[in-house]
């Protein structure tokens, strides 16, 4: 996904992250010819980036591999600038998706139908758009980090 985004949007700088160092090395290799991309090891629940440092955060089939995915959603909000977009898709908890992950023994905590909407809102995202497809097995989301209202202090005098 990152390689295609970088190839079709050469003016965009992409930072690709993964917790697994092997995946980071693979991403670096796959993105080597795209100078506007970087691949870094990062924990989605404790990102090492400054507050409000990205315009867009994407998540492609990643959240369900983060046991505390709610913290990953909060971190996405923290690193996004006001008005920034959080976009992605993931698997929904079902007998089929649970069985597939039990067979491959990957750590996971699948998102229940209707659960992501509340987590996005609590993390400060609006409007929340979550669509379910493929018989309810996949969810696609698009949300925008809310702008923080500026409150004027009316108790101060201006010279």
Image (cartoon, helix red, strand yellow):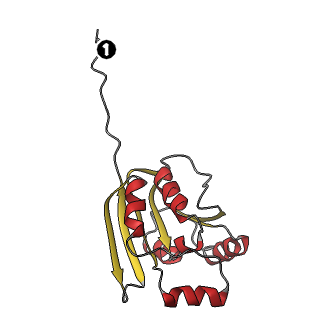
- Horizontal and vertical percent position of residue 130: 34, 71
- Residue shown at the point (34%, 46%) measured from the top left: 147
- Horizontal and vertical percent position of residue 100: 58, 90
Report crowding for label 1: few under 14, some 14 to 19, many 20 or more residues within 10 A (C-alpha).
few
In this orientation, which residue lies closer to the viewer: 5 or 96? Answer: 96
- Horizontal and vertical percent position of residue 122: 41, 54
In this orientation, which residue lies closer to the viewer: 89 or 22? Answer: 89
Query: How many numbered marks are there?
Result: 1
Whether residue 57 is visible:
yes
Residue reaching furthest top? Answer: 159
Whether residue 36 is visible:
no
The answer to whether residue 10 is left or right of residue 46 is left
Classify 125 as above or below 6.
above
- Residue shown at the point (36%, 67%) measured from the top left: 142
- Residue shown at the point (59%, 59%) measured from the top left: 45
- Horizontal and vertical percent position of residue 105: 67, 84
Classify 40 as above or below 51.
below
Which quadrant is home to the C terminus? top left
Location of mark 1 (residue): 156
- Residue shown at the point (59%, 69%) measured from the top left: 66
> What is the secondary structure assignment of the residue under circle 1?
loop
The answer to whether residue 38 is left or right of residue 155 is right
In this orientation, which residue lies closer to the viewer: 61 or 53? Answer: 61
Classify 145 as above or below 67.
above
Toward which corner of the image does residue 158 lie, by quadrant?
A: top left
């Amino acid at each position: 996904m990152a390689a295609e985004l970088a190839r079709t949007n050469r003016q965009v700088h992409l930072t690709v992250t993964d917790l697994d160092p092997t995946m980071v090395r693979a991403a670096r290799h796959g993105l080597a010819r795209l100078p506007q991309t970087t691949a870094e090891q990062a924990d989605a629940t404790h990102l090492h980036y400054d507050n409000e440092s990205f315009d867009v955060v994407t998540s492609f089939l990643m959240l369900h591999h983060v046991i505390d995915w709610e913290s990953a959603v909060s971190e996405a909000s923290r690193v996004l600038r006001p008005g920034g977009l959080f976009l992605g898709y993931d698997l929904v908890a079902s007998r089929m998706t649970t069985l597939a992950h039990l067979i491959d023994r990957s750590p996971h905590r699948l998102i229940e139908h209707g659960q992501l909407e509340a987590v996005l809102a609590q993390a400060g995202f609006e409007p929340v758009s979550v669509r379910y497809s493929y018989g309810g097995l996949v969810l696609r989301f698009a949300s925008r980090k809310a702008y923080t209202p500026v409150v004027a202090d009316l108790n101060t005098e201006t010279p």
